[in-house]
């Protein structure tokens, strides 16, 4: 909460609300949600208004707390254009008890149908027929006083948090599936368990080591989908077919390409039921950072990345390329938490946190639809300046249409490294 001595929000710093106004028709069906018990018809804060307020909070960096959001509701321009009005902090906190967060999935589904592909790789066009989907989870920290979910981490200290399970469409860089559970990553909150409940056919799931489970591989293969998953470096396998490495594979640092048998020491019902291809890729050895008291936070790599996949006909260098795309979801998580304000939770209840997460996904989709660009740091900053009435619409258009010199800069950096003798 903001302190009482804090300067009031300047109404002139909230402008250009017409972008959010265009979203209001999508929220009409939410109006009556939670009104079933309102026999007196005196509810002042409806679900669609609550969602609009959360989106306003996500897009305007000046609104950094619930109290500042309350002040925004008193501004006449905001109230008239967005159909909201001043609310009490108590009603805002308690309103989520009667709202149904799952109804926002319908809004997400409608927006998803309009998303524009932002990127593609011609190298994959003729070899991969599945939708490339990046899968991972991240922890959303909450306040220590919130009785959200308890788990032990870093010794004996307790922590309260939620785990956000995400499927990121690589073409649009927007989540297609999100699920919020407790943060323990076990039982029904285990990332493998959650993925099983959301599997779809004709998808290629790109995953890290935690998902390396044979029964999960079987489930994905059974529904005519594919996977590229990193497995442990000490994985035991018996080579059935050793495949030759061409120049492209060697350039991609592929050291071995083989069809193999895995899980020989497992029970028959937990072994792979289909051929699995194993790729060994050379990597820079490193210790994973982030551990407690100078320790590593988990396994890094000793110079080799081992990938398992059921894509038997895709060239080896493309399998390595597909796994490289997995880092896009790590970048998305950083953007999601640091730039969209999801590091600070507006509600202490699971329903309120779910609504905020769904609204953040909607915000990512809106950025895609408004700009045709990926929801990145610089784009969010420009839109924030626009909503603060600092940047003009012409300046936003100029920013959107500026030439993309990413490839030029990358090549220049590589040439510099070569001149310095660094590989």
Image (cartoon, rainbow, N blue to C red):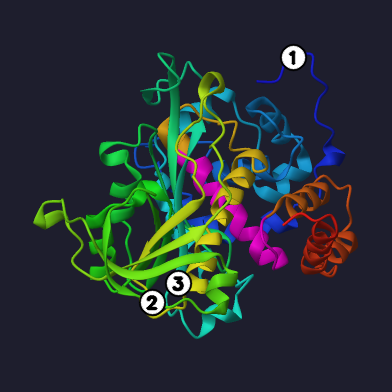
> Which callout, 2 or 3, points to the residue nearer the camera?
2
Query: Split into 4 quadrants, where in the image is the N terminus?
Result: top right
From the image, tell me which residue sits under label 3: 131
Reply yes or no: does residue 365 show up in magenta: yes
Q: Is residue 41 visible?
A: no
In this view, which residue lies farthest toward the bottom? 126
Task: Name the mark nearer the viewer: 2 or 1.
Answer: 2
Label 3 secondary element: strand
Residue at image x 65%, y 63%? Answer: 368
The quarter of the displayed image where residue 186 is located:
top left
Q: Can you identify the residue that label 1 sits on?
A: 4
Q: What SS does tag 1 mark?
A: loop
On whether residue 12 falls in the magenta region, the answer is no
Residue 375 showing in the rendered view: yes
Dot 3, how many residues are within 10 Å of its Cα: few (below 14), some (14-19), or many (20+)?
Answer: some
Residue drawn at the location 47% of the way across and 82% of the way down: 127
Which residue in the structure is indicated by mark 2?
A: 243
Q: Residue furthest left?
A: 268
Going from N to C along the chain, the mark reached first, 2 or 3, is 3
Q: Secondary structure at mark 2?
A: loop
Residue 261 lies left or right of residue 122; in this view the side is left
Circles 2 and 1, Cβ within 8 Å, touching? The answer is no
Prevailing secondary structure of the magenta residues:
helix
Q: Position of residue 88 (x, y in %)?
A: 59, 25
Task: Provide the residue span drawn in magenta.
Answer: 354-375
């Amino acid at each position: 909460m903001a302190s009482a001595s804090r300067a009031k929000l300047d109404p002139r710093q909230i402008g250009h609300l017409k972008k959010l106004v265009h979203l209001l028709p999508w929220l009409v069906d939410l109006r009556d949600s939670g009104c079933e018990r309102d026999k007196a018809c005196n509810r002042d804060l409806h679900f669609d208004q609550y969602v609009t307020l959360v989106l306003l909070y996500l897009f305007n960096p000046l609104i950094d707390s619930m109290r500042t959001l309350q002040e925004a509701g008193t501004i006449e321009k905001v109230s008239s254009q967005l159909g909201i009005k001043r609310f009490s902090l108590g009603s805002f906190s308690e309103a989520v008890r009667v709202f149904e967060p799952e109804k926002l999935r319908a809004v997400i589904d409608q927006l998803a149908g309009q998303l524009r592909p932002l990127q593609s790789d011609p190298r994959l066009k003729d070899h991969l027929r599945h939708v490339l989907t990046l899968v991972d989870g991240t922890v959303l920290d909450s306040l220590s006083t919130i009785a959200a979910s308890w788990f032990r981490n870093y010794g004996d200290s307790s922590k309260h948090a939620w785990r956000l399970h995400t499927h990121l469409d690589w073409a649009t860089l927007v989540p297609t599936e999100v699920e919020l559970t407790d943060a323990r990553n076990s039982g029904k909150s285990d990332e493998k368990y959650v993925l099983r409940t959301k599997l779809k056919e004709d998808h290629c799931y790109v995953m890290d080591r935690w998902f390396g489970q044979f029964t999960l591989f079987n489930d994905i293969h059974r529904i005519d989908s594919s996977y590229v998953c990193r497995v442990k470096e000490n994985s035991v396998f018996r080579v059935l077919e050793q495949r030759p490495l061409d120049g492209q594979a060697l350039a991609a640092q592929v050291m071995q390409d083989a069809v193999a048998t895995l899980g020989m020491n497992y029970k028959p019902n937990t072994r792979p039921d289909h051929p699995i291809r194993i790729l060994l890729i050379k990597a820079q050895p490193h210790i994973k950072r982030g551990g407690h008291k100078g320790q590593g936070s988990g396994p890094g790599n000793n110079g080799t990345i081992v990938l398992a996949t059921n894509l038997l006909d895709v060239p080896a260098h493309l399998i390595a390329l597909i796994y490289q795309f997995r880092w896009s979801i790590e970048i998305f998580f950083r953007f999601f938490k640091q730039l969209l304000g999801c590091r600070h939770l507006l509600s202490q209840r699971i329903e309120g946190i779910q609504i905020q997460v769904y609204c953040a996904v909607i915000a990512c989709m809106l950025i895609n639809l408004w700009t045709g660009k990926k929801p990145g740091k610089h784009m969010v900053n420009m839109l924030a300046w626009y909503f603060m009435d600092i940047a003009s619409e012409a300046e936003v258009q100029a920013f959107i249409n500026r030439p993309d010199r990413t490839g030029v800069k990358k090549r220049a950096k590589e040439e510099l490294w070569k001149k310095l003798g660094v590989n």
